[in-house]
Amino acid sequence: MVSKDAVASPFRAPFTRYAGTSAPAEVAEEVRGKGLKHAVGELITCPFCLAPWVASALLVLRAASPATARTCYSGLAAVAGSDFLQFAYAAAQERHSPRD
């Protein structure tokens, strides 16, 4: 969500330029700037680049404050469950839709 969601684009704006839409509910952005600004832009627009850093931050949070980490993990689990249900619903619709 952090790297592609339209809602988070104001946080990426200092490092990126809007280039259009890439998928439903996702924006395509081009990295701008040079040096550190470009590196940060690459990091925050690539979900595969951002994931290890987010995972590391969650591990540090778990070590520093287990109760807070559990709250964050619960929220992330709810989002994952919601995504799973959305994909299952879309698959069921596809399977049971009339064929032309």
Image (tube, helix red, strand yellow):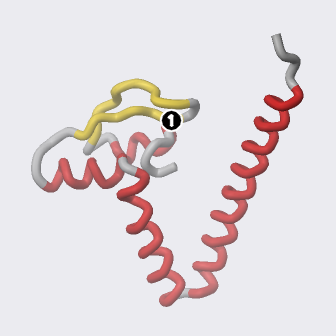
Q: Which residue appears farthest toward the top when viewing the image? A: 100
Query: Residue 68: percent from the left, percent from the top?
Result: 60, 79
Query: Residue 46: percent from the left, percent from the top?
Result: 37, 49
Residue at x 68% of width, y 56% of height: 79
Horizontal side of 24 relative to 14 (left or right) equals right
Q: Which residue appears farthest toward the left when viewing the image? A: 35
Horizontal side of 22 relative to 35 (left or right) equals right
Please tell me in which quadrant of the rendered image residue 48 appears.
bottom left
Q: Which residue appears farthest toward the front when viewing the image? A: 100
Q: Amino acid at mark 1?
A: Glu
Residue at x 52% of width, y 49% of height: 1
Residue at x 58% of width, y 79% of height: 69
Query: Residue 73: percent from the left, percent from the top?
Result: 63, 72
Horizontal side of 39 relative to 78 (left or right) equals left
Query: Mark 1 highlights which residue?
Result: 26
- Secondary structure at badge 1 equals strand
Query: Residue 49: percent from the left, percent from the top?
Result: 36, 57
Residue at x 48% of width, y 80% of height: 59
Please tell me in which quadrant of the rendered image residue 54 appears.
bottom left
Crowd band around label 1 with a 10 angstrom C-alpha radius: few (<14), some (14–19), many (20+): some
Location of the C terminus (image quadrant): top right
- Judging depth in this view, the residue of 100 and 3 nearest the camera is 100
